[in-house]
Amino acid sequence: MSSNAPATHLLRQLVLPARYERLVQQVGAEVAQLLVEPGMATKESLRQASLAARARGEGLFIPLVASSGTGKTTLANNLGAFLPADYASTVLHNGDVSHPDLVTAARDGVPPPNDPRLVPINIDHREATPPTASELAELKRFLREETVGARCAILWPQTSRDQAEEMARAYEEVAGRPPVDLPVAVEGPDRATWIDTAINTLRLSNQMIDSLELIGVNPRDYQPAAYETLGDFLRQVSDDFAAHLSRLLEESRTPIRLIVVFASESSDAGVLSQLTTGTRYGLLDANALLDATPASAIGRFWSDRRGALTQTIVRLDARALCLPPGASVPALRRHGGEDVVEALKTMGVDDRGSASVSESVSRSDLGRALLGAERATFEARGTPASQATSAFELLAEQGFNLGRDKGHNRSMAGALSEFLSGATLESEAIVPEEGLADSRLIPDNAIPFADYTICLEYTWRRGDFLTTGNRSTIAQYVLEKLKNYASDLGWVRV
């Protein structure tokens, strides 16, 4: 069996970065939402340094010293956010410490002449290697260069106080007494902010899930006083978070993903967009589901188990998607039972072959999800062909009970087999209406991939079903499915 599968399971995508650099890679510009003020003494030293540089007309060399995890990199890379009247955006310089390289790095970042702010230049790649005598001479030359260097502050983070003090002494011998005491000791954010920082980091890094701390690792359960630095605190929470995710994955021999498929005359997701997240295609939103049906028995069941509901959604990577007539009718025409095929032939619906069925499935929400689409929001694709809508209406008049829905489920298994084959997404044979190994689950369709099995649960409904008027009914149906899966897998007791 090929390992080619449509998407990585949600549990394998959740992260909790413990270092600033990794966090920036994860969330980009939104990292600004996580910035926490450094200590007042640190801010005051850097503010005085800026004022002194303006008065002297000369740039500054500023060694920064603190233990690993205190926040030196965060401070250096965001100095303009903490002291916006004194510093512009930071330039991260990874090149040689030479006059021409520094001029090139800083030139585009220098504000116009009427803007007195300094440009911080962070030399973060040389923490363990202090500047040589020749580099100190280059720094002096650069910082006295009128058009660029005189408007800059060279920041050199260090974890060793001895090295930082030696750097400051050596530069003083070359360039004279500095206007502020060096090195500048970096005081990290107040411990009172650490828990909120961890929670916000967790949420911002995994925006597809609300209240992710409910899955089993909650930063509120940790004591900041037990850790030397914010970095140590975040690393502990991050390590425990990763270990917990690993345990959740290991509890099932083959992880399961759940997709609840609503087949009706609805041409797009409709009200499903109110019950799912806006950041991961069709992923169910626990709070939205409970808000939609607070008074129902199933709503009350899960309201008493909010943490378990969030865990169930995450562990199942659970989604709710629309299957419009434009996708369901061609599948039923080609793979349906004799009575269904005959009824559709009477309506003038032709069997246009495997390629046509695969194409119609690929345009649906279900098909796009199986292909790994991760759109931020649903996209309506307009009204499907009137013939498909009329044909679905005819099938709905015949009813979806008395085993007809099970026949439609088997028809979809055939259509999806053709679709996956055409999309080169190889899986084992799609299994309709059979139990999964190692569980009591009997999904409508099971699609086994190398790393997990996708369970499809269909519900066939009359009319334009995905409307606001059916919001509570839809939420109850989804919550019941989640309850059944969580119970059968041993995650909740009923």
Image (tube, rainbow, N blue to C red):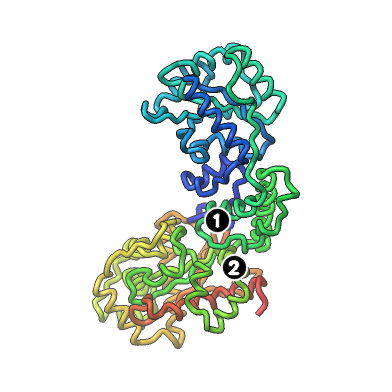
Q: Secondary structure at mark 1?
A: helix
Res. 489 in view: yes
Q: Earlier in the sequence, mark 2 or mark 1?
A: 1
Residue 351 versus residue 373 in the image, above or below: below
In the rendered image, the residue lying farthest to the front is 55
Closer to viewer: mark 2 or mark 1? 1
Is there CB contact under 8 Å for labels 2 and 1? no
Question: x, y (%) of residue 40?
Answer: 61, 40
From the viewer's perspective, tell me whether residue 108 is left or right of residue 434: left
Q: Quadrant of the N terminus?
A: bottom right
Q: Quadrant of the C terminus?
A: bottom right
From the viewer's perspective, tell me whether residue 312 is left or right of residue 406: right
Residue positioned 60% across, 79% down in the render: 301
Q: Quadrant of residue 480?
A: bottom right
Residue positioned 43% across, 83% down in the render: 404
Q: CA distance from mark 2 to mark 1?
A: 18 Å
Along the line of sight, the residue nearer the viewer: 299 or 370: 299
Residue positioned 49% across, 74% down in the render: 291
Q: Which mark is residue 312?
A: 2
Residue 410 versus residue 425 in the image, above or below: below
Residue positioned 58% across, 22% down in the render: 179
Q: Quadrant of residue 168?
A: top right
Look at label 2 and name its amino acid.
Thr
Q: Quadrant of residue 22?
A: top right
Along the line of sight, the residue nearer the viewer: 187 or 479: 187
Res. 446 in view: no
From the viewer's perspective, tell me whether residue 146 is left or right of residue 327: right
Q: Which mark is residue 458?
A: none
Look at label 1 and name its amino acid.
Arg
Q: Which mark is residue 203?
A: 1
Along the line of sight, the residue nearer the viewer: 289 or 372: 289
